[in-house]
Image (cartoon, coloured by chain):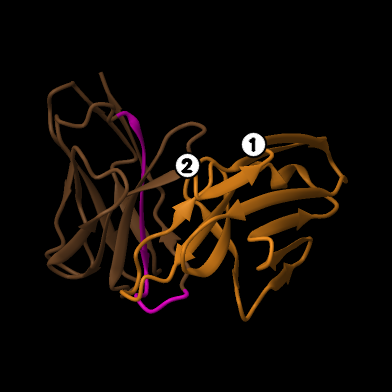
Amino acid sequence: DGGITQSPKYLFRKEGQNVTLSCEQNLNHDAMYWYRQDPGQGLRLIYYSQIVNDFQKGDIAEGYSVSREKKESFPLTVTSAQKNPTAFYLCASSIVAGPYEQYFGPGTRLTVT
Amino acid sequence: EDKVVQSPLSLVVHEGDTVTLNCSYEVTNFRSLLWYKQEKKAPTFLFMLTSSGIEKKSGRLSSILDKKELSSILNITATQTGDSAIYLCAVEENSGGGADGLTFGKGTHLIIQP
């Protein structure tokens, strides 16, 4: 089955710790994205990557970092510098040549206390 | 200032009613507008509307893009309790550089009462 997997589904961390969220896709898509969703806020773009070893900041990149060493994988690290890390994180992928639809993973709900 | 605005933010109707959800946008180089349905987890794709495809229909759901008014509507007829979800509108801009991500509205939380 082709799709996007995110792990874990729920993640709990103490304030001050870095945490890495996993995202893997087997859709052979070149582009991958990370979004953050807060209640009543819709989805906001954190980082995106159109090709391996290259990525760009989205609208709310501060306090986050990413890597794209493989086409299939785009992990997101939530650093201790992120002031409000508790949120629902969604990973997506798509082809590069638009117009295009993005396919979403099931999400990771991160709670930092 | 929000580039994509959805209204209403929440809506409660009875099963069998018809609903219309609105989305307006303000972007520099519009390429497409997408509608997604989200039921507690991953958004699932409903429609993509572009300058060459301004009307889409699938069963009880339909959507229209108004390029002049920079807006779109999503219609759901004969609503069912399974239509209860958050409906997200997103816009893609043509930056010339490929896939740059989508700009989402805040969503419309639709509740269908039996």
| Disc 1: CA contacts within 10 A as few (<14), some (14-19) or many (>=20) | some
Q: Chain of mark 1?
A: B
Q: Amino acid at mark 1?
A: Leu
Q: Secondary structure at mark 2?
A: loop
* Chain B display color: orange
Chain that appears brown = A
Q: Write down the region rendered in magenta.
A: A86-99
Residue located 12% across and 28% down the image: A17
Q: Are marks 2 and 1 in contact (CB under 8 Å)?
A: no
Q: Secondary structure at mark 1?
A: loop
B107 part of magenta stretch: no
Measured from the top left, where is residue A89 in percent x and y? 35, 42
Relative depth, front residue between A106 and B30 = B30
Quarter of the rendering containing residue B60: bottom right
| Disc 2: CA contacts within 10 A as few (<14), some (14-19) or many (>=20) | few
Q: Quadrant of the C terminus of chain B?
A: top right
Residue B86 appears in the figure: no
Q: Is residue B40 left or right of residue B102?
A: right
Measured from the top left, where is residue B55 in percent x and y? 71, 72
Residue A99 appears in the figure: yes
Residue B110 vertical placement versus B19 (above, below): above
A93 part of magenta stretch: yes
Circle 1 residue: B9
In the picture, the disc for residue B1 is: 2
Residue located 16% across and 70% down the image: A52
Relative depth, front residue between A84 and A3 = A84
